[in-house]
Amino acid sequence: MNATWQILLGNLAITALAISLWSHAYYHTRALSERRRNQAFGIAMGLGAICSMMLAVPLDQGVFVDLRYTLVAVSALFGGPFSVLLTIVIASVFRLSEGGSGAIDGVTSICIVGMVGLCGYLIVRRRKVRLADAAVLGIAVSATLLVVMSLLTSQANARAVELVGFPITILNFLSIVIAAFVLIQFERMAHDRDILSAALTQTPDFHYVKNREGKFVIVNKNVAEHHHYPSPAAMVGASDFQLATQRRAEMLHAEEQALMESGRSQLDKIEYLTENGQERCYSTSKVPLRDRTGTVIGLAGATRDVTEERKIEQELRESKDLLSLAMAGMSDGFAMFDRAGTLVFSNTQYASLFPLSGEVRVPGTNIRDILKKVVESNERRDFRQDVTDEWLSEASAALFFDKDEHIELHDGHWLSLRTRVADNGMALVAVSDITTMKQAEFALRTVAEQMKSLAETDALTGLLNRRAFDHAISVAVERSRLERRPMAVLMIDVDRFKAYNDTYGHPEGDECLKAIADCLRRTMNRPQDVLARFGGEEFVVLLPDTDETKALALAEQFRQTLLARAIAHSGSEYGVVTASIGIAVKSNWKQQMRASELVLEADQGLYQAKRDGRNQAVLWSPQRTSRAAR
């Protein structure tokens, strides 16, 4: 390889280094405005061009050839006018300071290449730069340089094109494509990182990431608000020593350092903390984070407030303990089996608790015979029907293990079997009728489920509340996307409702809202339809597997049902209570859509219905409205 090629390849390395340094600094410039970021990019590319010119190929006294044009072109394509102007100024000033017969020609070339790059920017400025765009720019710049070298350097050195024309053409093309590839990849990485950061900071509960020193790297909004920081970004760099007492901070720091040293995860650790005079319960999971080499580089944590869940669990345990205590005062059944599994002692209650197999539960009977009778009489619901010697051996051997069992009998009664193995190998079994306790447990579960239902239901109308609807529409959007089925959202607002309240009073206003909820139930009565009170006099309906035609028809049916009620409203231009309806339909799932966007479109349709005179349904479309049902 001759010296010219070696120097040009060194130039290529300098260019690659400049692009690499900017790429590594790229994410830190995301906080700047676009104009300032482009200016910083132009300065960086200008400095890179200076480095390239310092390692140039000398053709003649004052005539140099290098890869400065790559950085000028890239500055224009990715940074635009502000960027390339700074790059041209920096590179031109340096080239003039170098002097020589080719100084003016060099500055001219820099300006021309900058203009070519700027043309590329103007072509692609409304979209993301692709690698194909960079390839086209590389070809254009290479061709431009050949023409410029032929025209401008002919007076200084007629052999310029002959000596370096081909190397310059090839290397400029390659360096532009490589530089563009690196910048595009880093932009994508930065974009992906922004998405991950946004997802983390906006998720519910308390989510955070710490580095090896225990300082917060990323926190979500809940963590920042909990610790009275104005934003998640303001909390970055803080540690537990700034948030908690010295003792607790030291404990947390030591615990987390131990986790990162061991590489083990901590899952669902329960902690009780006193906050504002009240005790709160939190479930915390912490997972060490590793880089590609397996080295632990930090810690990810997720904390959930489980105070209410713990209260319910405590109430259930207390109720169960209370019932168990009451049962302990009653006469239980007792039985003792020897090491061979033969019943050697039992009381009367023991046999009476098993109505179908009680006749064989007498001293002298082996556990195998008792089990056969249980299976033949179908006394226990959890036993299999096909009896084999292998199964009998396994079931008999299970007698000689300490265990607590709850079994259900054929008649729905529940028994508690507490088995304990003595030091001499004998098995003692205590049997209690826990049917009442089980029923109470089931009742408590039912109450807990009812409490959950009440928390998700609007007390006035009996429809779902806003919180429950938000969850329902998130699930429905994902299901419709996976199944490629249409879905619709109806946003409904009672017309002139304030005037109705002012005229008839709030009690009558409540009755009016109940009537509207009833109309909704009569109209949207499929099992999959979700009806909710959105707030005040606004209602929202989620209609899975529903296209535009069906949605409009249901909206019109509801409107007519409400009109048929003929609820008098002197403050309305229609004389009766009416409603305006906004409709949004999603049927094309090739483009992603969040649930909030679908609700917003329905809301925009509702506003259009209000503007058009109320008492109508308007289907939202990008052209503001498409069809209306009056």
Image: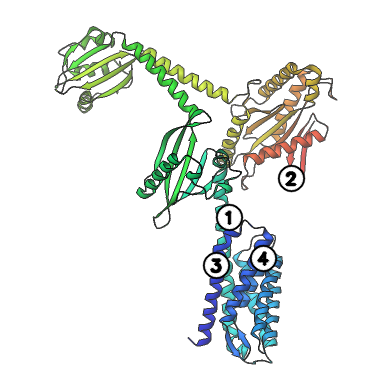
* Residue 412 visible, this orientation: no
Residue type at mark 1? Answer: His
Nearest to the eye among marks 1 and 2: give it: 1
* Amino acid at circle 4: Gln
Q: Residue at x 45, y 48 (%)?
A: 214
Left or right of 23 on screen, residue 106: right
* Of marks 3 and 2, the one in the foreground: 3
Q: Tell me the residue that label 2 is attached to.
A: 622
Q: Position of residue 21 (x, y in %)?
A: 55, 67
Point out the frontmost of discs 1 and 4. Answer: 4
Disc nearer the start of the sequence (1/2) = 1
- Name the residue that disc number 4 marks: 39
Mark 4 Cα-neighbour bin, 10 Å: few <14, some 14–19, many ≥20: many
Query: Considering only vertical position in the picture, is 558 above or below 235?
Result: above
Which quarter of the image is occupied by the C terminus?
top right
**How far is the residue under mark 3 from the one under mark 4?**
16 Å
Which residue is label 1 attached to?
Answer: 191
Quick check: 328 left or right of 161?
Answer: left
Secondary structure under the numbered disc 4 in the rendered image: helix
Identify which residue is drawn at 66% across, 21% down: 461
Mark linked to residue 21: 3
